[in-house]
Amino acid sequence: MIRRIFASLLLLLVLITTPLLSFLYATFETYLNPDFYQNEDVVNKIYDKSLSFISTNLAQNENLKIFTEEEINEQLKQILPIETLLELNKSIFDQITKEPLPNEIIVDLTEIKEALPLSITEIIENYTNKLEPCTEEEIANMVNQQGENGIPTCLPPDMTKEQVINSLNDIQSSDSYKNIPSQLNLNLNAIPAQPRMLMGFIIHNNTLIRGILIGLFLLQIILIGLIIFKPIKSVLRWVANAFFWTGLPLALMNLTIEGTVKAVLFQFAGQNPNINLTQADQTMQFVLTFIKLMTDKIVIHGIILTVIGIVLFIISFLIHTKNDELK
């Protein structure tokens, strides 16, 4: 009886601590893990979601409404191709993972700087080719239609598309890019000593930290088994309960997060009637993408724990003992 009480208390402790351990493990597996940021699938997902979010917002700009979101997305990809981002990303994290932590991180912008003029020129040509001849009303309000940046929103009758393209190209001539640096130098010495030391410890001991977190969870499970001790059928059922009931909430994590985000959004919109609900929802979905990079790992933890629990339950029912009760 006493052993059951101690085992119950320990099981309660496991139910409380496992979500925290899973959260910490997932954080060290994702956000605090340099290898995570070098995973091409992760980079591609962030790249696509970011461009989609930016395209959606740019498409609402008056001067860019002649472009569809898909066209804006393609133009952004020309400015920063995924291949360039992957190379840049690899270079940065190759430097970060050096031991000891380097004094500065060099971000090479040469390729972006060289490709930018050509990309902008192509965007200008695509933009101009979509311009329609100005109506009489637009001609009468030509100054207002050009906007603060002098960007035409229609084709003036006294200008050809080639002239408009040349005019816009003059505005963004190659001289405009001379002030863009070929590289950025991020000085890590500017970070205070203790945070910098902690950052280096996390980066270089990530695998060890995750191993310790797994060990803390398994230690509690082993203690439950040792407290019950016998018969083996009872041990398996107690351990199965620990695995199953700690894993199930984690496996449903993403469902609860999406529901919570939607509830918060609608509550916020109700208190702020002037808010653009569609734009707010797009922003929340964009943020949720980054949150799910971590919570997806927690869901996997939950599925693994739940499956192990079910398997142990099945095994315990297949084991025959003379007495299922503790002596």
Image (cartoon, rainbow, N blue to C red):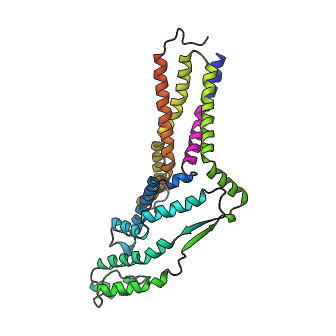
User: Which SS type dominates the magenta stretch?
Assistant: helix
Asked if the stretch drawn in magenta spans residue 291, the answer is no
Look at 41% across and 82% down and name the residue there: 147
The N terminus lies in quadrant: top right
Please indicate, yes or no, whether residue 277 appears anywhere in the rendered image: no
Compared across the picture, whether 4 is left or right of 163 comes to right
On the image, the x and y values in percent for residue 270 come to 47, 55
Q: From what the image shows, is residue 33 above or below residue 246?
A: below
Q: Nearer the viewer, residue 67 or 273?
A: 67
Which residue range is magenta in the image?
Answer: 14-29
On the image, the x and y values in percent for residue 242 come to 55, 28
On the image, the x and y values in percent for residue 214 come to 59, 37
Look at 45% across and 47% down and name the residue there: 258
On the image, the x and y values in percent for residue 173 come to 44, 84
Q: Nearer the viewer, residue 145 or 226?
A: 226
Please indicate, yes or no, whether residue 238 appears anywhere in the rendered image: yes
Q: Nearer the viewer, residue 188 or 261?
A: 188
Look at 38% across and 79% down and name the residue there: 121
Q: From what the image shows, is residue 234 above or below residue 243?
A: above
Q: From what the image shows, is residue 173 above or below residue 88?
A: below
Q: Quadrant of residue 93?
A: bottom right
